[in-house]
Image: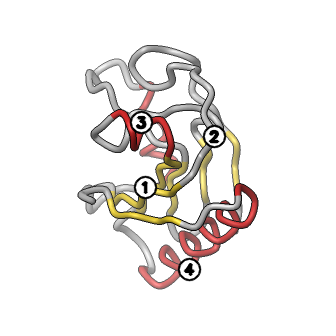
Amino acid sequence: MNLIVNHVPVSKKCRPGTKMTPTSITIHSTGNPDSYASGERKWLENASNDRTASWHYVVDESQVIEAIPPTEVAWHAGNDIGNKTSIGIEICETGDRSKVLANAKELALHLMRKYKIEKMVRHFD
């Protein structure tokens, strides 16, 4: 797993800077059939992006990008409880799907061990 740390600046839109202790992981799909991790990361700071939404990690077939520290709140879960307790992982839909999923699995297992997390949910949960 090629992990790149490239944090977005603190802002109301993407990274409030609020500390948290993660107790779960929420798995998302980018919903974009043309997405790669680098493009998804750039979108967080794109001037035309007017959504208040973010995630901690984005995964594609060749890399994982950490956009927000996993010990800070991100706007990804759709509710306060999820946002304030869960690490958000976005999975890209391009490239070799088996490699994308293997990278996502490796990342999730790493985070579960590091933060002693036992609960993983899907976004719509």
3 or 2: tag closer to the N-terminus = 2
Asked whether the residues under the numbered discs 4 and 2 touch, taking CB atoms below 8 Å apart as contact, a structural biologist would say no
Q: Position of residue 115 (x, y in %)?
A: 71, 55
Q: Nearer the viewer, mark 4 or mark 2?
A: 2
| Mark 3: secondary structure | loop
Which residue carries the number 1 mark?
90
Q: Mark 2 belongs to which amino acid? A: Thr
Residue 102 picture quarter: bottom right
The residue under the point 47% across, 65% down is: 120
- Does residue 118 sit above or below 76 in this rendering? below
- Number of the label disc, if any, that sits on residue 64: none
* Farthest-out residue, bottom: 98
| Mark 1: secondary structure | strand
- Does residue 77 sit above or below 17 in this rendering? below
- Number of the label disc, if any, that sits on residue 102: 4
Q: Is residue 27 left or right of residue 124?
A: right
**Residue 1 vs residue 38, the one in the foreground:** 1
- Number of the label disc, if any, that sits on residue 21: 2
Q: Mark 1 belongs to which amino acid? A: Glu
Label 4 CA crowd tier, 10 Å (few <14, some 14–19, many 20+): some
Q: Mark 3 belongs to which amino acid? A: Ser
| Mark 2: secondary structure | loop
Q: Is residue 72 left or right of residue 78?
A: right
Q: Position of residue 19 (x, y in %)?
A: 62, 27
